[in-house]
Image (tube, helix red, strand yellow):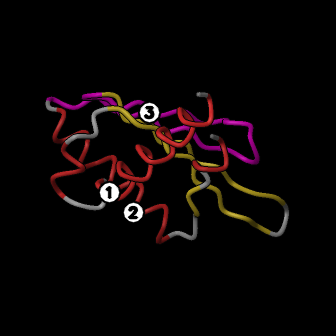
Amino acid sequence: PMLGLRIQYVRNRAALEKARNTPEGRKRITAETRTLVRREKDGSTTLRISLDEKRIVVRSGRGVEFDRVQQLIFTSADEARNEYFRRLQRGATQGFIDASDAEG
């Protein structure tokens, strides 16, 4: 029974991950957290970006220590979601990789 639950969980996550790359799939996302990591000569930099309805929280710092926290509140969930995905894309263009799967 536990193996069946794990298989169903993995299938659901894969379907959500595939859907998040489409405009329709993105509209279904109202809460999500992604962790982005960039390796550097003297360690790593981490960004943790969280979407929660109309709010985005961005935490950043060296390694796993977050020394900066920024909260952004929007008038609509659509605005927050669009900014969330913009920030994820910006992180990717700055050399950050999505380490979210490594956490789960």
Rendered position, 94 above or below 75: below
The answer to if 69 sits in the magenta stretch is yes
Kindly check if marks 1 and 3 are in contact, taking CB atoms under 8 A apart as contact: no
Left or right: 37 in relation to 98: right
The residue at the far front in this view is 1
Q: Residues within 10 Å of mark 1 (few under 14, many from 20)?
A: few
86 above or below 74? below
Instruction: Give the labeled residue for mark 1.
Output: 86
At horizontal 28% and vertical 40% (from top left) the residue drawn is 29
Q: Are marks 3 and 2 in contact (CB under 8 Å)?
A: no
Q: Which mark is residue 89?
A: 2
Q: Residue at x 34, y 28 (%)?
A: 52
Q: Which mark is residue 57?
A: 3
**Is residue 3 or residue 11 the one in the foreground?**
3
Q: Quadrant of residue 69?
A: top right
Measure the alpha-carbon separation of dots 1 and 3: 14 Å
Extreme right residue here? Answer: 42
User: What amino acid type should be assigned to the residue bearing mark 1?
Assistant: Arg
Q: Position of residue 34 (x, y in %)?
A: 50, 45
